[in-house]
């Protein structure tokens, strides 16, 4: 141990991920909190009184019609989106776009820090080895008991000479992980990795993929993303970006079409993208990092600071509710709007059990869809660029917990 003490990667993460949003506030914008910014959206960003106090990175991305998402290939933009709010996902990684760094490390063999993919692979192998050893132990125990029974001897469980039948121990959560280094050792290892990487040329084949809700939040809510045409590389106006995102909720073949007509009718308020974004924006405005929850059979996961600091605390299931029942009968989005039909108790218990096992609290998010006849219209009236339109969606939460009589007698 040196006088500088041990090097804690968490301290470095606090510095790397110190900004909650891609926008950076100057000293004169200090009174503006993140929550206020997210609630006001573009109306705050275009304000002349604060525009000089906010550093806007203005990153660029390319629309991909096949996946209905935006691809970001510039490394600086990727770092900004990931380190400032955990936006997007690496196309060749679990979450953080780290494929290029992992490949260089694989070639050079330098570095003592494991990526998320490497840690997961290591722990899975340890669990696999433990299960094999446990199965062998069970077979040996049964065979020894049978031999003892036939010979009329004591059971191996009662015998003291059972060294070979010692039960294998479960791997510790940090087993196999690199030991904590001192800061001098960490700096030396980083310098060695940088020196080796200079002589290695690896083409970065990974891009960052932004899902539709993230695209609209960054492009409209924060005004820090420019979406371009994949062929002409011309920037889309926000109205075109909105129509492209709305089209992701249409059937697969129609989503492959090029740019929708600018004279298209406004979407209905029960469009699946609009319902999903209303939930996404709501929780982003409360300071949560919102990520997809398909791994745990839910719509969204909420992280307190980000995926690099802790596991998700809450799992969200979006349940749409029509303010006007007639809209549900005439809706063209039947079968596309998830959980529009009542959830049966068996499925709800399954969701709750799955998320309880991983220490997540299940929350049912009821989204009240405003009527299509609002504002004197007979069908669609939503334009997406007006914050008042999004304010018409009402969100209510119901927390679901598993009832355990032994623990909840009071």
Image: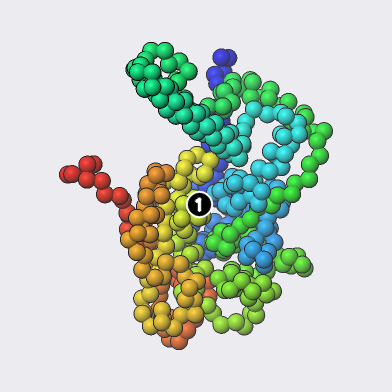
- Residue 262, image quadrant: bottom right
Residue furthest toward the left?
410
Where is 208 relative to 101, above or below?
below
Which of these two is toward me, 306 or 409?
409
The image quadrant where one finds the N terminus is: top right
The residue labelled by disc 1 is 295
The image's colouring method is rainbow
Which of these two is toward me, 401 or 324?
401
- Residue 260, image quadrant: bottom right
Residue positioned 56% across, 82% down in the render: 265
Q: Position of residue 174 (x, y in %)?
A: 51, 28
Q: Position of residue 201 (x, y in %)?
A: 81, 39
Where is 154 relative to 323, above or below?
above
Left or right of residue 245, residue 71 in this image: right
Label 1 secondary element? helix
Q: Residues within 10 Å of mark 1 (few under 14, many from 20)?
A: few
How many marks the image carries: the answer is 1
Q: Position of residue 39 (x, y in %)?
A: 46, 60
Q: Position of residue 67 (x, y in %)?
A: 64, 63
Residue positioned 48% across, 73% down in the render: 335
Residue positioned 30% across, 50% down in the render: 402
Which of these two is toward me, 19 or 374?
374
Res 333 seen here = yes
């Amino acid at each position: 141990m040196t006088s500088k003490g041990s090097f804690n990667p968490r301290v470095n993460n606090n510095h790397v991920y110190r900004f909650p949003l891609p926008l950076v506030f100057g000293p004169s914008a200090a009174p503006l909190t993140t929550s206020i910014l997210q609630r006001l959206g573009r109306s705050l960003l275009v304000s002349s009184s604060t525009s000089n106090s906010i550093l806007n990175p203005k990153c660029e991305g390319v629309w991909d019609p096949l996946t209905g998402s935006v691809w970001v290939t510039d490394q600086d933009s990727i770092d900004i989106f990931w380190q400032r709010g955990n936006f997007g996902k690496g196309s060749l990684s679990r979450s953080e776009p780290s494929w290029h760094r992992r490949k260089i490390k694989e070639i050079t063999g330098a570095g003592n820090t494991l990526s998320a993919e490497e840690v997961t692979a290591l722990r899975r192998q340890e669990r696999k080895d433990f299960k094999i050893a446990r199965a062998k132990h069970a077979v040996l125990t049964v065979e020894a008991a049978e031999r003892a029974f036939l010979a009329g001897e004591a059971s191996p469980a009662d015998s003291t000479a059972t060294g070979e039948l010692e039960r294998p121990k479960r791997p510790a959560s940090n087993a196999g992980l690199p030991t904590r280094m001192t800061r001098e050792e960490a700096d030396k290892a980083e310098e060695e990795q940088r020196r080796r990487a200079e002589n290695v040329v690896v083409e970065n084949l990974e891009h960052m993929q932004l899902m539709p809700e993230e695209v609209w939040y960054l492009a409209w809510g924060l005004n820090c993303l420019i979406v371009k045409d994949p062929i002409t590389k011309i920037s889309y106006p926000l109205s075109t970006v909105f129509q492209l995102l709305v089209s992701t909720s249409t059937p697969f073949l129609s989503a492959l079409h090029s740019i929708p007509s600018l004279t298209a009718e406004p979407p209905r308020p029960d469009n699946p993208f609009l319902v999903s974004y209303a939930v996404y924006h709501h929780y982003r405005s409360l300071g949560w990092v919102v990520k997809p929850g398909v791994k745990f059979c839910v719509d969204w996961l909420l992280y307190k600071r980000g995926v690099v600091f802790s596991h998700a605390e809450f799992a969200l299931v979006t349940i749409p509710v029509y303010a006007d029942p007639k809209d549900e009968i005439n809706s063209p989005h039947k079968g596309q709007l998830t959980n529009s039909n009542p959830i049966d108790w068996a499925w709800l218990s399954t969701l709750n059990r799955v998320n309880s096992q991983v220490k997540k609290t299940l929350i049912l998010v009821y989204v009240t869809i405003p009527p299509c006849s609002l504002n004197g219209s007979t069908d669609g009236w939503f334009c997406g660029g007006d914050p008042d339109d999004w304010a018409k969606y009402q969100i209510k939460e119901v927390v679901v917990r598993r009832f355990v009589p032994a623990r909840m007698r009071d």
